């Protein structure tokens, strides 16, 4: 990949990445024909979520936010 910290989990189907700059996120979506994004970041730990949601919407792809914290264990109740 020409982008930093993007890796294929299942080649041609599933990718994972660190948080990308909005312009890189947009370019990656277009280049790899992404159909859905699953974001595991917690909104209090990321200020890019609104930008990613807007870019996803503009590209006609689904955006799922499943908040998880890098600092706390998930509540399983």
Image (spheres, rainbow, N blue to C red):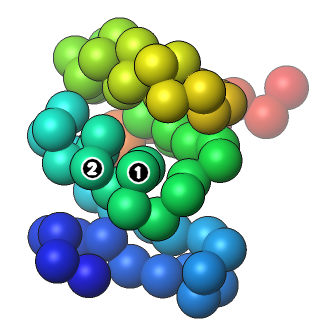
Check the image and report above or below for 13 versus 18: below
Q: Secondary structure at mark 2?
A: helix
Outermost bottom residue: 11
Q: Quadrant of residue 65?
A: top right
Query: Residue at position x 17%, y 69% from top?
Result: 3
Q: What percent of the width, then of the height, locates residue 61?
A: 62, 33
Check the image and report above or below for 75 versus 43: below
Q: What percent of the width, then of the height, locates residue 66?
A: 62, 31
From the image, tell me which residue sits under label 1: 30
Q: What percent of the width, then of the height, locates residue 45?
A: 27, 24
Query: Are discs 1 and 2 less than 8 Å apart at CB?
Result: yes
Q: What percent of the width, then of the height, locates residue 22?
A: 20, 33
Query: Residue at position x 31%, y 71% from top?
Result: 6
Outermost right residue: 77
Quadrant for the C terminus in the image: top right
Which residue is nearer to you in this view: 55 or 17? 55
Instruction: Give residue 38's mark.
Output: none
Query: Residue at position x 40%, y 14% from top?
Result: 54
Q: Secondary structure at mark 1?
A: helix
Is residue 49 visible in the rendered structure shown here? no
From the image, tell me which residue sits under label 2: 27
Residue neighbourhood size for the residue with mark 1, other residues' Cα within 10 Å, grouped as few (<14), some (14–19), many (≥20): few
Quadrant for the N terminus in the image: bottom left
């Amino acid at each position: 990949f020409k982008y930093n910290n993007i890796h294929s989990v299942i080649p041609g189907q599933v990718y994972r990445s660190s948080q990308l700059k909005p312009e890189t996120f947009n370019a990656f979506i277009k280049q790899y024909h992404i159909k859905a994004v699953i974001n595991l970041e917690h909104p209090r730990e990321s200020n890019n979520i609104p930008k990613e949601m807007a870019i996803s919407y503009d590209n006609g792809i689904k955006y799922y936010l499943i908040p998880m914290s890098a600092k706390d264990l998930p509540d399983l109740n």
